[in-house]
Amino acid sequence: MRNHYCIIMAGGIGSRFWPVSRNAKPKQFLDILGMGRSFLQMTYDRFAQFIPKEHILIVTGHQYKDLVKEQLPEVSDDRILLEPFRKNTGPCIAYATYKLMEKDPGASVVVAPSDHLILNDGELLRNIEAALELADREEVLITLGVTPTRPETNFGYIQANKAKPTQIKGHVVYEVKTFTEKPNMELAKVFVDSGEFYWNSGLFVWSLKAIDKEMSRLLPDIYTLFRNGKGIYYTTEEQAFINNVYAECKGISIDYGVLEKSKKVRMFAANFGWSDLGTWESYYIQKEKDSSGNVIDAPVNFLKDVTDCVVISQDKNKLIAIKELKDYLVINTPDVLMICPRNEKTVKQVITDISLSKEEKFL
């Protein structure tokens, strides 16, 4: 429709996918799954199926402008919003919201991460179209919740109020009771067993009017800072204004700042083959495995008694020879070789240790 837009958030650094994902070129710009398109390109392609291309905005770090232009040359400069600092999703969404309000205050928008895996585009788009219909007529904040297939400690959860379901175009919609960020395994099992909890996909739909009202009430400081740009957006003064705003505003997620506190949140219960694919472990879960439980993307390899490992090599001419290894990551890039246990905690610690060492240049 004429006044439907999409905001793609592409400012993350994808640190948990190191050493393939780097500060200079994070995972949203990579084709980690071997699909022929980067995560950002696939996200753009997905929403361009029903949102006019000229209505798609990319919010990213200032250092990634050239990467966005290289991968999406059809996106004009005024639709690439450059953040001078990473301040989480609250300021990111506020920037896009108040810029769009300058142009089309009656619009409804889809807000999407740039680096998530979606296996069923058709089902996602049907949910989004129904959510946009609801957003066009009611001032509510809509999030898409995914039915969990396992207890997962790397995802956030949404608790639905199962007592008050409604339907929009055949899609079940619930009021929301609670949001919970990344529970421990014991709690994740309780969530999944209860049948009330859904994975938080990070996909949102709302009208600009609805998010404007809730931001003014729940994030008044951020609201005021970005609202003060009225008359500056879409001018040559915009970037300098935004640089100053980001220097002043606090970093906060839209979930914590608005959604967890608002009484206007609704959740679509959906299944569209979603994963945020934020870690090597989630990559392992999604990828096809050999008879020994290994995920292998190494052109030349000799593996003996290797089980449940991820083995990746970007060197087509190097033999990767491994014997007697279980539950490990072996990631070989042109300048880094990482070998460590296949668990999120260890990978995170490796990255932290390197960031504090003289080898920080490799991050």
Image: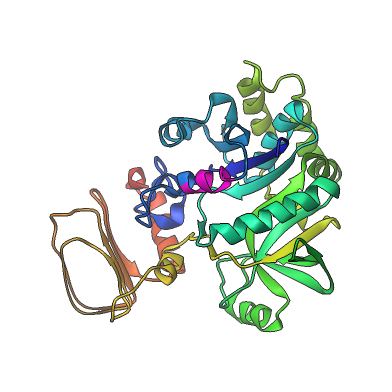
Query: Disc count in the image?
Result: 0
Q: Position of residue 319 (x, y in %)?
A: 13, 62
- Note whether residue 105 is visible: yes
> Could you say which is closer to the camera, residue 233 or residue 239?
233
Q: From the viewer's perspective, is residue 108 above or below residue 129?
A: above
Q: Residue at x 70, y 30 (%)?
A: 99
Residue farthest toward the top in the current orientation of the protein: 236
Q: Residue at x 39, y 46 (%)?
A: 22
341 falls in the magenta region: no
Q: Position of residue 267 (x, y in %)?
A: 75, 62
Q: How is the image coloured?
A: rainbow
Within the image, what quadrant is residue 213 found in? top right
Q: Residue at x 53, y 62 (%)?
A: 120
> Could you say which is closer to the camera, residue 305 or residue 168?
168
Q: Is residue 316 left or right of residue 18?
A: left
Q: Quadrant of the N terminus?
A: top right
45 falls in the magenta region: yes
Which range is magenta? 42-49
Q: From the viewer's perspective, is residue 115 above or below residue 327?
A: above
Q: Is residue 318 left or right of residue 349?
A: left
Q: Is residue 312 left or right of residue 42?
A: left
Label the magenta part by its dominant secondary structure.
Answer: helix
> Could you say which is closer to the camera, residue 182 or residue 307?
307
Q: Is residue 294 left or right of residue 5?
A: left
Q: Residue at x 65, y 57 (%)?
A: 126
Q: From the viewer's perspective, is residue 9 above or below residue 163?
A: above
Q: Position of residue 111 (x, y in %)?
A: 65, 47
- Note whether residue 218 is visible: no
Q: Position of residue 2 (x, y in %)?
A: 71, 35
